[in-house]
Image (tube, rainbow, N blue to C red):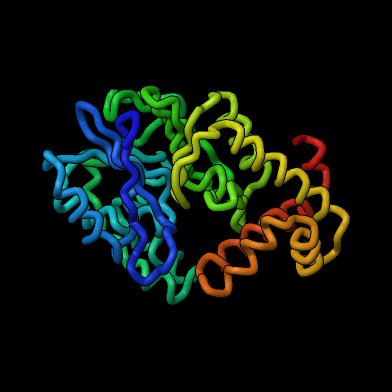
Amino acid sequence: MSYGVELIDATPDWLDVPFLATYLVYGDRNVLVDAGVKSSSEKLIKALSNRDFDELDYVLTHIHIDHVSGLGYLHEKFKGYVYLHPKAVKHVADPSKLWETAKEALGDFAELYGEPKPIDEKYLVPVGNGMIIPSGGELMFIHTPGHASHHISIYHKDSNGLFVGDSAGIYIPQLEYIIPTTIYPCRLDLYMASLRRMKLLKPGIIYYAHYGISEDGWKKIDELYNRIVEWGKIAAEINSLESFTENILSNDESFREIYSRLDDVPLAKILVDLAIKGIYEEVKRDPEMLSRF
């Protein structure tokens, strides 16, 4: 733990690699950033039960199933407020549509994550862009759409750190590499605007949901931004998704090394392929988009 922030692993046991992080932020009221999945909820409850509290507030960066399906199970044990984007409130109060969408998108992997439980709406607090709460020291919410329309990121004043959820990539610490989280369908223009907004905060630390902590801070955001610009230029010159994938693999040695290992992690392979597709399809949808980056 540093700066009052502790990474608590929420990777379910059926995944062989560290994949999903939650963050416990200490303060007058402790806050858990993201809630993991149902299939790792007992693991999280056990880890949190070793602490000297029986109440806990929560922040959801967004409500994709890997960030929210554990919430109801944690909330039964540790009651508290849940801070989230206004668009997300109704889907956390009644997650039936969220669950159906997850099953359509992820198939058997959704079942492995587990079905979310509803949360009483009296606990749900919609947050505006720039809103600050004193919990966890001082947390400021930034609306960061692109990966999802209801995505928020959270600036932690005490650590000059930013909890980015899925708004700023997947961090591969072994190679110091960031994979885009431009999961199809996405809004690439909004995603890039969100990266610019986050970079302006000049965070010294990035807390990645997938996976870990980087003390390169805003430089990692800049690195991802430039990578997407380069990949977008390639997409603009190529006429098939397959050729686009082959081209970035041939031109990016680190990404090629990562991609070659994904056959052993089928879920990660699906997500990375969808991220590649997200960039390709967005550039084809709006060829002028690159000129605005």
Using the image, determine if residue 281 lies above or below residue 269.
above
Please state the horizontal and vertical placement of residue 37, each as a whole percent of the image: 33, 60
Please state the horizontal and vertical placement of residue 136, each as a whole percent of the image: 28, 30
Front residue (pair 202, 239): 202
Q: Quadrant of the N terminus?
A: top left
Q: Give the side of residue 259 with respect to residue 133, left or right.
A: right
Using the image, determine if residue 22 lies above or below residue 52.
below
Q: Give the side of residue 57 with respect to residue 253, left or right.
A: left
Which residue is farthest front? 174
Please state the horizontal and vertical placement of residue 75, each as a whole percent of the image: 20, 50
Can the viewer see residue 203 in this picture? Answer: yes
Q: Give the side of residue 87 with respect to residue 5, left or right.
A: right
Which residue is farthest bottom? 108
Using the image, determine if residue 198 lies above or below residue 177.
above
Q: Quadrant of residue 250?
A: bottom right
Q: Give the residue displayed 61% in from the left and 57% down from the top.
A: 185
Q: Quadrant of the C terminus?
A: top right
Q: Give the residue displayed 70% in from the left and 53% down from the top.
A: 279
Using the image, determine if residue 197 lies above or below residue 49.
above
Count of residue discs? 0
Q: Give the residue displayed 25% in from the left and 45% down from the top.
A: 121
Can the viewer see residue 89 in this picture? Answer: no
Please state the horizontal and vertical placement of residue 210, each as a whole percent of the image: 47, 52
Q: Give the residue displayed 20% in from the left and 26% down from the top.
A: 28
